[in-house]
Image (cartoon, helix red, strand yellow):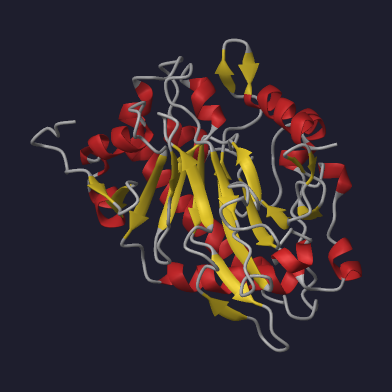
Amino acid sequence: MPVPDNQLPVTLTNDGAVSISYNDLKSSPHLLTPSIEKAFGSQPDSLGIVIVKDLPEEYVRYRERLLKLAYKFATLDADAREKYVDESSKYSFGWSHGKEIMNGKPDTLKGSYYANPVVDKPTVKAEEQQKFPEYYGENIWPAKDEAGVQDFEEAFKDLGRFIFKVGCELAVACQPFALARFSDSNLSLPDLIATSQTTKARLLHYFPPAQAGADAELDSEDQPVDSWCGFHLDHSLLTGLCSALFLKNTEGEPIAVPPPSPKAGLYIRTRGGELTKVSIPVDCLAFQTGEALEIATGGKLLATPHCVRVVPSADALNVSRETFALFMQPNTDQQLSPSMTFGQFSRKVFDEHYQ
């Protein structure tokens, strides 16, 4: 795809993912259209993901602090974790483990902590709050004196708000490309994200294969590619992702280790159906497209099918995976199409994935 003279050239990572500089994103978002089209377009080799590099230095610190707290929370006593479970929100605020249906069965391989890092108390109409407690509930945070996770709320908000800011800036760069494909030409992707009260962050702890009961006898070539997290689509407009942190369980503090296998990690299906492993550098963020954007563009911008793979080995059995995802989406009363609001669409998704 030729790049116009007045646009920045497209840069790819070794995995074939589009990479853009945060400096360009801030100063010249209008020059990134070829990169956005390559990342999120319909070409067979488009991955539906963009890597943002050259981030402010505090990002690395925010990421490491929160991902280590993910491990600490997930290894609290079960009784301590259960204090932060919220059934009334369909387990969409606070701690959730074994409630989501993945690959047709309850997912016990990972635990999640959900919160809105941008809005603590939503201000939408009471009727809308009652209809959608999964979005408009109040955040639940570990007690300030909960041993080992005293800084949890601050760390969660620092990282979540950092990613939200970058996501809003990316939305500005995406707007010219998205506007030409929106079913409603009045829609603004930056406004849909920046003004929303449904933003949701998910802090994830993938339990070590030995602890989760994964079958370690399988040869790595036979292990299903979606062995840790089944193939799925996010139901957001855009999703921000951190590089995962792998931690080895020891008698003291966990030790950061390399991925247990070069084949372990995030896998994406290209628009053409090819399976590609995508690595997110430690000092970078990734953003991928969700189903809400696919619906709002009448299928012109496709959501990104992805999964997470673990490759069992003797060295990996006591290694957990920690990561963080930020789902940027519109308010529940926002029309995605003439016949469907975001609330109606997301209710359908929840009914499919939760008992």
Measured as percent of width and height from the top left, residue 330 is found at 57, 33
Q: Quadrant of the N terminus?
A: top left
Q: Is residue 27 left or right of residue 86?
A: left
Quarter of the figure with residue 84 = bottom right
Q: Can the viewer see residue 267 in this picture?
A: yes
Residue at screen point 46% across, 27% down: 302
Measured as percent of width and height from the top left, residue 81 is found at 84, 65
Quarter of the figure with residue 55 = bottom left
Residue at screen point 67% across, 57% down: 218
Residue closest to the far left: 5
Quarter of the figure with residue 9 = top left
Measured as percent of width and height from the top left, residue 69 is found at 66, 72
Q: Can the viewer see residue 197 in this picture?
A: no
Q: Is residue 29 left or right of residue 165?
A: left
Residue 259's place in the image compared with 5, above or below, is below
- In front: 312, or 324? 312
Measured as percent of width and height from the top left, residue 139 is found at 74, 54
Q: Quadrant of the C terminus?
A: top right
Residue at screen point 50% across, 73% down: 258
Residue 224's place in the image compared with 204, above or below, is above
Residue 173's place in the image compared with 217, above or below, is above
Residue at screen point 58% across, 51% down: 308
